[in-house]
Amino acid sequence: MVSAYYKPASIYGGPVRSVSALCEGLMQSNAQVTVLTTNANGAEALTVPTQQPVNVDGVPVYYYPRLASRLAGSYFYSPRLRQACRENIRKQDVVYICGTWTYAMLAGATAALEAGIPFVVSPRGSFMTWSMRQKRLKKRVYLALLERRLMNGAAAIHCTSSLEQQQLGTWGFRPPSVVLPNGLDLTPFGRLPERGKLRRALSVPADGTLSLFVGRLHQEKRLDLMIEAFAMVARIMLNAHLLIVGPEGDGSGKKAQKQVHELGLSQRVHFAGLLTGMDLLQAYADTDLQVLLSHRESFAMVVAEAMAADLPVLVTEQVGLAAEVAKAGAGFCVAADKEKIAGAWVEMLLSPELRQEMGRKGGNLARRQFASEVVAAQMFKFLSSLPASKR
């Protein structure tokens, strides 16, 4: 496994949780997994030993220093990671590369091609329509000069949803693509904390509702649209509250706080920052539904987590799991229109029975399709089917 970042770098959101869950699941499926990554943790560095194996929940992980300049940092530039790829990849049967447009992709794919080892690329949404509109010229140039050649050298491309596979197809890469969902360790969701602690801290009335957003506070999450829709909800439901959980991404969090203040919702919309572990589980236990209205999500790990916690979800059509949510009846999938969002939101909040039924169906879906052991078994079978190395 080659990735630009790895657990415990939770600042990078869903991919950190899903990739580590995949590695742990593969280990439990009797695969031998080695992770090569950087010590990146946003603008900071993880406080972990580097250039030596670190046991991270049963997985041997090698962290390599990322150079700290602004340009090098966003590219995850790490010469020592590239050296490690050249030394270690030739010993492997298959390489799995998480993410594109990073130095980790360049280092891992180049080393695999040189050694004749088959590799799989998991773009994690980077070739979805909205993503490719961002920094458009830079991406087109990089794609033409380098990234397309690396992508076309892969044995396969791993998509985490049918929506991602559909949008990836417009770029004409040669390798076949396969859809396998992200896996999730369901154990923590089987013993959620007692409901109430967070609600009391936020002064949510006993008869009030608390909706939840979880994710990096970035423009792709459409926080402005969510707050506009919630303002409409709040005028109808006087005891409705919204909890926004996640670290600042690109300044969108500050803009959202200003928007909340201007709308007079400061007592109804709460910003919690980054929550992990038991604090995040408490948020799932204390909320009534989850909202995610992103421009794009290749999968949406937080939606899978919400369903594992038996929470109903409200998502837009651009969220990777939208089709699964709609098919299972685990929530509502709506167009990115504030009136339609607000209407669905109010309908869910007005009916505890509807939320309970949606939550039950979502929980069943999560346990049936997204359990880490289920996904790991599928991935193990897929990786084992790849052509043998050319070494």
Image (spheres, grey):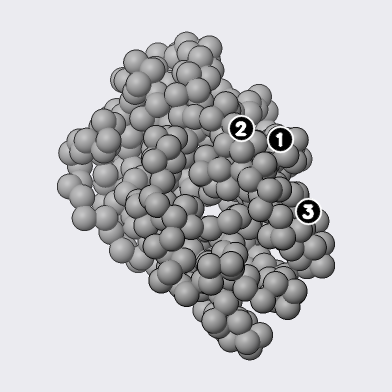
Q: Amino acid at mark 2?
A: Leu
**Residue positioned 36% across, 45% down in the render:** 6
Query: Regarding mark 2 in the picture, which secondary structure is present there?
Result: helix
- In the picture of the structure, the residue carrying the numbered disc 1 is 328
Image x and y of residue 173, in percent? 68, 33
Direction front: furthest residue: 206
The residue indicated by pointer 3 is 334
**Residue type at tag 1:** Ala
Q: CA distance from mark 1 to mark 2?
A: 7 Å
Check disc 3 and give the amino acid type.
Val
For the residues bearing labels 1 and 3, Cβ distance under 8 angstroms: no
Element type where label 1 sits in the image:
helix
Return the x and y of residue 166 as percentages of the image width and height: 74, 37
Residue beneath label 2, please?
365
Could you say which is closer to the camera, residue 306 or residue 302? 306
Residue occupying the point 36% across, 30% down: 24
Vertical position of residue 2 compared to residue 379: above or below? below
Left or right of 286, for residue 231: right
| Image location (x, y in percent) of residue 330 | 68, 41
Of the two numbered discs 2 and 3 in the rendering, the one whose residue sits closer to the viewer: 2
Marks 1 and 2 close (CB-CB < 8 Å): yes
